[in-house]
Amino acid sequence: MSLSTIYNFFEKYPVVVTDTRKVVPDSIFFALKGENFNGNEFAELALQKGCVYAIVDEKKYVKNDSYILVDDVLSCLQDLSREHRRRLALPILAITGTNGKTTTKELTFEVLKKKFTTYATQGNLNNHIGVPLTLLSMTKETEFGIVEMGANHPDEIAFLCDIAEPNYGIITNVGKAHLEGFGSFEGVKKTKKELYDYLQAKGKVFVNSDNEHLMTMLNDQDVCTYGNSESADSKARFLQADPYLVLELRSAQIGKLYIKTKLIGAYNFENALAAVTIGRFFDINETDIKDALELYEPKNNRSQLKKTKNNILFLDAYNANPSSMNVAINNFANLKSKNKLVILGDMLELGDDSDKEHRILLELLEENALDKVCLVGKNFTKVNTNSKFETFPETKTLVEKLELEEIKNYYILIKGSRGIKLEQIVEKL
């Protein structure tokens, strides 16, 4: 069946689902395949639950006109989303980077919706499936779209750009992450740069002029810079992050404007300034920008400050890589508190660099005189040689210890890769 015909169906029934547990009436089911499942097998169930059509790519599952047979369901989903994006013809901002892309996306969304009817990637739906689903969730009422793009292999950002066709782009930063897929830090930079390459003759890039890596990755292209330096197009000054981030905007119109966020960590300064810069570029009133950033509250275990009955938790357990770990540890070390506990989980997907990168973090903890440390995971357990640092092969064993030993009146940093599931210890602290 032709793409135009499928799009006609989508216009009439503009809700797409890929999971039969999330079926809503009058939606269209796309029977995607994975390593351990075949969505074609669930097409009949999707229709029984209320879907109007089921897009399948195996003829044996077609039973009546409610089944639409295509060559490849995933390609059809991606092509349909590109077609939808083109017909909407709205401005799209693409956000990628090693760290901070989700926080930057959320902050930018809060800022842009002060002026525009804005839709942004939900959660972390930022891959070859998530990006199409994000685009297909935008409607004729949407005035501005924000698309987060993740990658763990070369050419992925270029591929996502070909689907989303962004007009604007921002790379938050580049660091060591997913080294198994990228091969090296240079591989990370090359893949993230694919966003700059796509926009070279097609749109504008927002770039942190204080970041040497990002500046050297630029092509000869249209840019709007932000940072601390006087030469930046959009300027601000970091004031403090103890524990919450406070920044000072420098504005020709209103002089100094102080923004007191609910974000923890000095490392969020550049994420907040990115959102400020994008808001300024699109002529959003700076007091509205201030309100947007001050009202935003982080969630999903990202840059959260959580006060329990016994302790204050610095919860950043959604993801971890060498660069994000480094800034989190340094920021935590600078906080004014006598009682500090660091709980770190393994960094995953580092390939041959895993042992080295975990050892570097152990040295960083020692340099910052952070002695009360719990390390969780096989990698940290393997490389730790500091007798003061406790190691646990998995989170479950740390939970068992915390059930027996009550910890009170501490600042506690909790950070690790999502796969370590450090959020399980929160209720014990």
Image: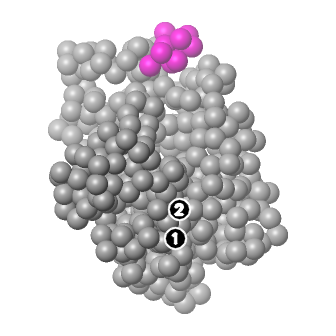
Q: Does the magenta segment cover residue 278? A: no
Q: Are marks 1 and 2 in contact (CB under 8 Å)?
A: yes
- Residue type pointed to by label 1: Glu
Q: Position of residue 384 (x, y in %)?
A: 54, 14
Residue bearing the label numbered 1: 83
Q: CA distance from mark 1 to mark 2?
A: 6 Å
Taking the image as drawn, is residue 388 in sight? yes
**Relative side of 131 to 338, left or right:** right
Nearest the viewer among 71 and 413 is 71
User: Is the residue marked by circle 2 packed among few (<14), some (14-19), or many (20+) residues within 10 Å?
Assistant: some
Figure quadrant of residue 345:
top left
Taking the image as drawn, is residue 339 in sight? no
Q: Residue at x 29, y 49 (%)?
A: 63
Nearest the viewer among 426 and 94 is 94
Indicate which disc residue 79 carries.
Answer: 2
Q: Residue at x 60, y 68 (%)?
A: 165
**284 in relation to 419, above or below:** below
Q: Residue at x 27, y 20 (%)?
A: 399
**122 in relation to 282, above or below:** above
Figure quadrant of residue 311:
top left
